[in-house]
Amino acid sequence: MLEKRIINILRDIVGKEYVSTEKTDRICYSYDATQQQFYPDVIVRPADAEQISLILKMANAENIPVYPRGAGSGFTGGSVPTQGGIALVLTRLDRILRIDQDNLIAEVEPGVITASLQKAVEEVGLFYPPDPASLKFSTIGGNVAECAGGPRCVKYGVTKDYVLGMQVVTPQGDVIRTGGETMKGVVGYDLTKLMVGSEGTLGVITKIVLKLLPKPEAKKTMLVMFDSIDGAARTVSNIIRGKIIPTTLEFMDATALECVRQNADLDIPESARAVLIIEVDGDRELLERQAARILEIAAPLGVVHTSIAASDEESEQLWQVRRSVSPSLRKVNPDKYNEDICVPRSKLPDMIRAIEAISNNLGIPIVNFGHAGDGNIHVNIMVDRSIDGHEEKAEIAIREIFAKTLELGGTMSGEHGVGTSKAPYIPMELDSATVVYMKAIKRALDPKNILNPGKIFLEDL
Amino acid sequence: MSKHKDIEAYRKQLRECVKCGTCRAHCPVFKQVQSEAVVARGKISLAEALMNGEVELDRRLISDISQCLACGRCVRKCPNQVPTDEIILALRRRIGREKGLTLFGRGVSTVLQRPWLMNLLTRLGRMFSWLVFRKVPQSSGLRLRFPSPYISRDRTIPEIAPRAFRQSHPEFIAGDEDKPLVTFFTGCMINHMLPEIGDGVLAALQSLGMNILIPKDQGCCGLPALCAGDGQGAACLADRNLEALTAHKADFIVTACASCHSGLTKHFRDLGPDHAALAGKVMDIHEFLVDQGFDEKLLQLPRQENPQPVGYHVPCHLREPGLKEAPRKLLSALPSIRLVDMKHAGACCGLGGTFSVYHYDISKKLGALKAEGIRDSEAEIVATACPGCIMQLQDTINHAGMSQQVCHVLELVAADLKNADIGQANRKEAKLR
């Protein structure tokens, strides 16, 4: 528990009503979407960089851990206060500062909800592409800190491809600027890229300058069913090899299809063992040609059925099939381990086959779906923790899947980050010299390890 | 002991919340308050902590649990369909049991359980209303002259009707012999404050030649008592309604209040097989009329020139598919009006039953959002399907200094039937074919 003196300092900095040590608040700011719970000692909701700077200076002087937090919707424990201390809730910094239509950029505060930003820029004909599934409630600050992805990233890239510059409060309380507002810029180290995806361990982001694109004129959505997962996976590889980059290229395996079969508006024939949802966007006249070319590539690979959306409503119906997978997974088993591995796109068929073999060997269902177009698979290991041995089997499955991913030249997380959930597996992917290099950066910037301690690296710094 | 499920019975459902945060995007109160304790995910964590003995039922927790409109958005949008609305009601029942009801909750429960007391109070209320209330200019509403602990002085409240709806109509109104018997559950607000809605329901049903039963023994639907945490009182009301509504073998039971509909169809199912059967039989009047093809018949009425622009506010308790479209279908079929788009038409009005009594400031903020949508639309009339929403929306419009009138869909239906000389006035002769 923090001393009364510390709480009073925090109250002086941000104002009394924005500091809480109430038990109910400590409970409500203890979790994220990993469902782990660690109670913070105090919840502080600052208004600006200046206040955050004072908080971090004090925390350094007093050796108190500080855990930056947006919506708390992360999948790897990035915002969970594992060592107590201060939960630094950033949702009051929620202004869109400007949308600059002359330079196609936007300047925002970290607490802006990603969907609100997208709506605001689309109203003036612009486009912010990264679209994590949580976009209606996750914050842009959290998206930047975790380098969020989403279905559209196949064509448009991930969050880091849109961050031009930032204002950051360093772990020791200095306010710095990274990057800028220009499309190019090579003065000094690229701190922007270092900050994006640093999971709140290297600084607290207080302003973000984002690159915007013109909003595409139109889009076309197709849903293609295959008689084998292999056919679907090979279609993905062939589309990419055919030098076509669709906007999205999502897939679902047979178990995922089974989960949604009853509730889908769409007839899913028994012979369908995998589905690809493919969307192309851009100039209206180019779409038809691109779509036709994609269907041509898929045709010889075991297509069972093809639906092409004729309207936005029908497109929404096709997407509903994909969106209803995640919630319906509980039909398979009550508990899930959700990994988001990413492999080179040409290796997708190999990876899918390997996961199938691991699932069969261990006798536990593994449901695969996700962003096939960039090789990013959401692997859902479905277990029942109340059954003896299930948890151990899940652990073995995770290790085997990670090992195969790395063997194929992939990475164990495409977009969810490391946080606490993947920290134990870091040595599988990063050699010790690389880890030493990373830790040296963290140690130099945060010598007392007060900013989001316990994340990414398990052992002491 | 309440017959409703105890919070302990929800352990499994509580575990199904994976803390994904989807509820943050949909909770109207959270959008105003921005505190995690308000949103479904937070309340579920608090319920778990309470059951595990990590937190006590202190003032702060009770206040957090009271911050819910019972609008059901979090449940509908939840990927795992965790029934947060039921969980919150179960928590409130536990609070009521262990800490006692609030003065207001006790008042609500006492009055609503005793129809004679309600009748007496409304009669007295009407008699002395000039003493307590002043009229709001340009509207039919009233405001308190003096401060009161629960009702803010700047709040508009509808006038009490000169005569309660159920007292001004016979219990049975005969229709055509070959037509079904429809039981009308009025609810308290239609009975005592807005009987014109009831008149609208009768006009529509009579134009179809229906036989109508308005059971005298029916009472409050029980939702206000349930929301206040009085499980026992709510269950008593449910038992009384079960008896009153099933005494005669009606073919249909209809409501014209979205909240009563939700109360009767959703919240008493678990009390027993008879309650579940009753719940399965209750229909919203709009849904019923559309099922009977009434909208098709309205479309055959002669169209009028310069139809009046009307916006539709979707009550939170009529958002389910099937229920959601029916009022719009009827409105679009009316000859004298033109249904126009209204921004935030689906946003909560902010009433939330007792919510607005305890949290009127947040309620007003939610209202302000609605006012913005109404102002930016062409609508001269805002129609809706819930008397509670009508009260709140009129209050909102008065606060914003606007001039739109709020009414029930069935009032507009009745007006057009009257224009076409169909319905109550000459029900023997003219009917919709």
Image: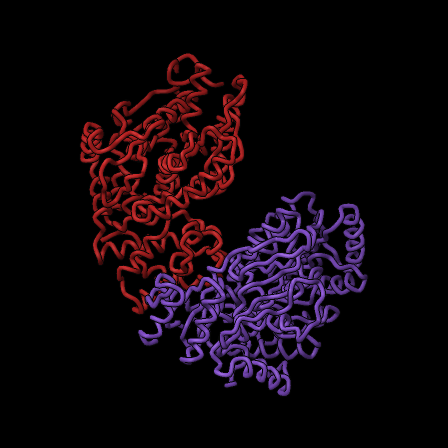
Chain colours: A purple, B red
Say whether residue A386 is visible.
no
Query: Residue B335 location, x and y as percent?
Result: 51, 21
Residue at left offset 49%, top offset 38%: B373
Viewer-side residue, B109 vs B277:
B109
A433 left or right of B119? right
Tell me which corner region of the image, top left, top right, bottom left or bottom right, holds residue B43. Answer: bottom left
Residue furthest to the top:
B429
Residue at left offset 25%, top offset 25%: B163
As drawn, B69 above or below B255? below
B9 left or right of B415? left
Query: Residue B196 location, x and y as percent?
Result: 35, 25
Residue at left offset 38%, top offset 31%: B251
B276 left or right of B230? right
Number of marks drawn: 0
Query: Residue B14 location, x and y as percent?
Result: 40, 61
Query: Residue A253 location, x and y as percent?
Result: 64, 62
Residue at left offset 68%, top offset 55%: A103
Say whether residue B67 is visible.
yes
Viewer-side residue, A428 vs A325:
A428
As drawn, A43 above or below A105? below
Tell me which corner region of the image, top left, top right, bottom left or bottom right, holds residue A179. Answer: bottom right
